[in-house]
Amino acid sequence: MKIIRLKDLSNKDYQRIVNRSAGMNRSIMPFIQETMEKVRKQGNQVILEKYQQRYGKENYQSIQVTQNEINKAYFEIDKKTVKALKQMIRNITLVQKTQLLKRKDTIVEPEKGIKVWREWRPIEKVGLYIPGGKAIYPSSVLMTAIPAKIAGCKEIIICSPPGNNGRIPSATIVAADMVGLKKIYKVGGVEAVAAMTYGTETIPSVYKIFGAGNSYVTAAKMIALEKISIDMPAGPSEVFIIADETANPKYISADLLADGEHGEDSACVLLTTSEKVAQETKEELTKQLTVLPTKKYVEESLKKYGLLAVVESIQEAIDFVNNYAPEHLEIMTKNNRSIAKKINNAGSVFLGDWTSKSSGDYATGANHVLPTGGMAKMYPPLGVDSYGKWMQVQECTKEGLKKIKNT
């Protein structure tokens, strides 16, 4: 990667970096719509045919994870993983429980005899999409399920794509079971979104779908909006780092590469006031890349949506951040809290050298389901409040009604 001065960035490159891979791939929409319609009309048949053809009937006998599969999953994961999941559950629960402590507004009396207030209610039926495929995401189970449980959702279901053996990864199953979820379904992609939207003979329809997936899942969720609600449009992962001369280039590089590992459409940006930090970060990136098994994907993401730039001032970096609206923002500077106060648009903010992106993705208790593609300008991170809605209540006495009869 080249190091440039931000002020010298061409308009074309500026748009490429800011826009990254955001936006829907329109070319896949006909396939998405066709698949959604098939599931709506044919239900289980579409799901069974897909996975039995792929894995064989002997490996994919049921859409729902059975109790035997849950029991088997516990034998297949090590104690270290269970211990880590328990710590994550504890931290996420502690953080999420502090949200939405007030579930009823103060009663306002605009006229004598008239009272107006709001009361919060949980969404009764929610569906959680847990990605699979190349990686395992038990953390995503916890990030989506725990706030749903705290909110008080009555029915919580999980859909996750099976792996090569026709089964969901054991760690994902165990994570779901540890937080009390029993309705776990072995289906992913567009079919999962369609099933949760319309319902099948096995999978119940829900009122809102949560969780990130690939471009096909995101497109399917947008179609699902015609009937139900979704958490947010989610795209490729992104990390943005503001650094000054006090930042550690080794840590900067590690976090940029950790994000690039998510795929070739991931976005990685560093803005620093220090030319020395920029140069040392570039050298570290080259050094650390050599030992990454995902080197090919990371190099592609750095080429497409990566940026190493020197800024004249921290304010210049802040202005760029607020326009970019990153999913993850790391601030590795002096006075990082005062800088954070000037940030309006970011999904999750990480302060200081020791607050790595991965710490928040897994164990600090903050949620890792975040808006991407500039959506942090209008969408918040996932939280307990995402799993409910406010209901408006009003009450008039006879006297109160008389006071407003002429309006």
Image (cartoon, helix red, strand yellow):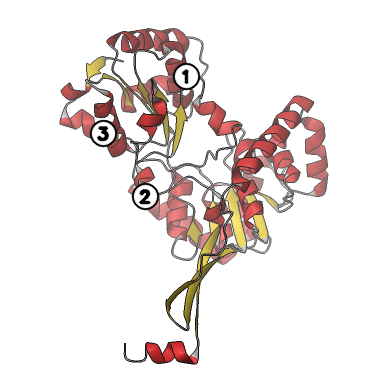
**Label annotation for residue 353:** 1
Q: Which one is closest to the eye, mark 2 or mark 1? A: 1
Whether residue 167 is visible, yes or no, is: no
Q: Which residue is mark 2?
A: 378
Q: Position of residue 306 (x, y in %)?
A: 33, 24
> Do tag 2 and tag 3 residues touch (Cβ < 8 Å)?
no
Residue 402, image quadrant: bottom left
Check the image and report above or below for 42 versus 241.
Answer: below
* Among the two numbered marks 2 and 3 on one chain, the one whose residue lies closer to the N terminus: 3
**Label annotation for residue 319:** 3
- Residue toward you, 164 or 210: 210
| Residue name at image x 40 percent, y 41 percent | 372
Label 3, label 1: how many angstroms apart (C-alpha)? 22 Å
Label 2, label 3: how many angstroms apart (C-alpha)? 17 Å
Check the image and report above or below for 169 versus 331.
Answer: below
Identify the amino acid type marked 3. Answer: Asp
* Among the two numbered marks 3 and 1 on one chain, the one whose residue lies closer to the N terminus: 3
- Residue toward you, 332 or 130: 332
